[in-house]
Image (cartoon, rainbow, N blue to C red):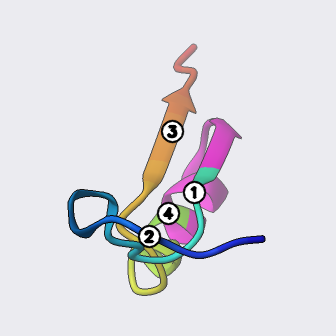
Amino acid sequence: MGGCHHYADACHGPAIVALGGGHGLSAVLRGMKHYTDRLTAIVTVA
């Protein structure tokens, strides 16, 4: 059974987690924010 059942837990797309770094991750995150507002990223920088 899926979906949102409470007003406070309103669904705004799937929860997405992205790991990594570089220009590719930046492009993916920029695109994903058009599909969900439940976006988390762990970014590495060398």
Q: From the image, state whether disc 2 or disc 1 is nearer to you.
A: 2
Identity of the amino acid at label 1? Ala
Q: How far apart are marks 2 and 3 (CA)?
A: 27 Å
Q: Which of 11 and 46 is in front in this view?
A: 11
Q: From the image, state whether disc 4 or disc 1 is nearer to you.
A: 1
Q: How far apart are marks 1 and 3 (CA)?
A: 11 Å
The residue carrying pointer 4 sits among few (fewer than 14), some (14 to 19) or many (20 or more) residues within 10 Å by Cα, namely some
Look at mark 3 in the image and give the residue it sits on: 41
Q: How far apart are marks 2 and 4 (CA)?
A: 28 Å
Look at mark 4 in the image and give the residue it sits on: 29
Look at mark 1 in the image and give the residue it sits on: 15
| Quadrant position of the C terminus in the picture | top right
The spot of residue 32 in percent (x, y) is 52, 74
Relative to 12, is 9 above or below? Answer: above
Is the Cβ of the residue at disc 3 closer than 8 Å to that at disc 4? yes
| Secondary structure of the residue carrying numbered label 4 | helix
Q: Where does the magenta region start and end?
A: 17-28
Position of residue 19 in the picture relative to residue 23 (left or right): right
Q: Which residue lies furthest to the bottom in this view?
A: 34
Q: Is residue 23 magenta?
A: yes
